[in-house]
Image: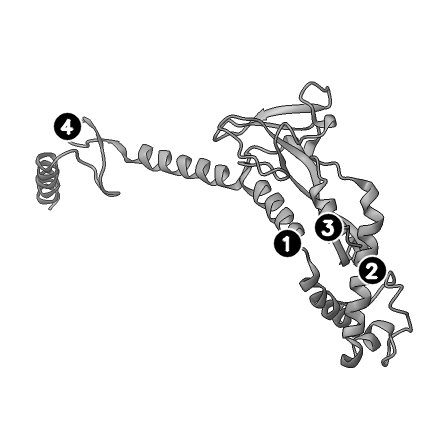
């Protein structure tokens, strides 16, 4: 349902976001828009045999109307193929606002360098809030746990938020909320006091990779620190098989080995 300005309820719902909150008064209108989209996609598919697949009018499929898609189906059968084909048709109906909202939430969850709701770029050592999900749109057709078909269900994406967008239940002052430092960049990570959250060591995948790269570099540098087998002086090896600190010591070591070989004969 479009407003007087021509903007759809789904677009207005995205713009109504305030952190994890939305204007729920727009939900019913947004759902009706999604139902209309589902019906339109079904009408477009009348000549393709897709409705027959969804209704179960073909061999070995149970009869079920399109208006009730909440039954179980065989992923390897016609029902699964019909649902997948219908979902592909629905992609073109996705709003740019919904696509941008999902991309922002995903990027924030991966980098922890910006807010997944408002897009604010977090400063160095500015707290990042984990454990909350933001609204990113409504899908006319989707699937939940156990393969259950979901019709016009609001979609929320777990992401990283800034202080302004974080919900009240994620306040650092609460006893059930904890703050840890990223093991690499030392950014404060605010999250619920749960085991899954406490196991987080890094704020992002890039920090995890950088940390392990540093460890590997330090380990390689440590392995290059050796003691010359001739003069006993410590040196940094430039080759894996280096045992002497200089060309002179290398020559002495060579002569010593030759002498030992002659004496052993």
What x and y, as percent, mark residue 2? Answer: 77, 54
Q: Which one is closest to the eye, mark 4 or mark 2?
A: 2
Q: CA distance from mark 3 to mark 1?
A: 17 Å
At mark 1, the secondary structure is helix
Q: Which one is closest to the eye, mark 1 or mark 4?
A: 1
Q: CA distance from mark 4 to mark 2?
A: 84 Å
Instruction: Locate residue 194: give its quadrant.
Output: top right
Label 1 packing within 10 angstroms: few (<14), some (14-19), many (20+): few
What x and y, as percent, mark residue 125? Answer: 51, 26
Disc 1, disc 4: CB below 8 Å? no
**Residue topped by disc 3:** 5
**Residue topped by disc 4:** 231
Instruction: Locate residue 77: give its quadrant.
Output: bottom right
Q: CA distance from mark 1 to mark 4?
A: 71 Å
Left or right of 257 on screen, residue 151? right
What x and y, as percent, mark residue 71? Answer: 87, 63
Q: CA distance from mark 2 to mark 1?
A: 19 Å
Instruction: In this rendered view, identify the residue nearer to me: 49 or 200.
Output: 49
At mark 2, the secondary structure is helix
């Amino acid at each position: 349902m479009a407003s007087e300005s021509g903007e759809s309820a789904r677009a207005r719902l995205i713009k109504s976001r305030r952190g994890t909150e939305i204007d729920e008064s727009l939900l019913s209108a947004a759902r009706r828009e999604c139902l209309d989209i589902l019906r339109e996609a079904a009408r477009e598919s009348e000549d393709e045999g897709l409705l027959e697949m969804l209704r179960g009018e073909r061999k070995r499929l149970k009869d079920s109307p399109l208006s009730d898609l909440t039954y179980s189906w065989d992923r390897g059968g016609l029902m699964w193929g019909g649902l997948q084909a219908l979902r592909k048709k629905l992609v073109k109906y996705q709003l740019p606002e919904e696509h941008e909202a999902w991309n922002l939430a995903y990027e924030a969850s991966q980098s922890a360098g910006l807010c997944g709701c408002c897009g604010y770029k977090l400063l160095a050592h500015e707290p990042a809030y984990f454990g909350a999900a933001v609204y990113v749109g409504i899908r006319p057709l989707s699937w939940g746990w156990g393969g259950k078909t979901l019709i016009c269900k609001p979609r929320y994406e777990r992401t990283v938020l800034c202080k302004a967008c974080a919900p009240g239940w994620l306040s650092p002052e609460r006893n059930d909320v904890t703050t840890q430092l990223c093991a690499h960049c030392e950014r404060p990570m605010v999250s619920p006091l749960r085991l899954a959250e406490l196991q987080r060591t890094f704020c992002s995948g890039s920090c995890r990779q950088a940390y392990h790269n540093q460890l590997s570099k330090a380990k390689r540098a440590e392995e290059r620190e050796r003691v010359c087998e001739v003069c006993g002086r410590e040196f940094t090896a430039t080759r894996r098989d280096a045992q002497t600190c200089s060309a002179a010591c290398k020559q002495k070591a060579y002569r010593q080995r030759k002498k030992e070989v002659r004496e052993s004969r």
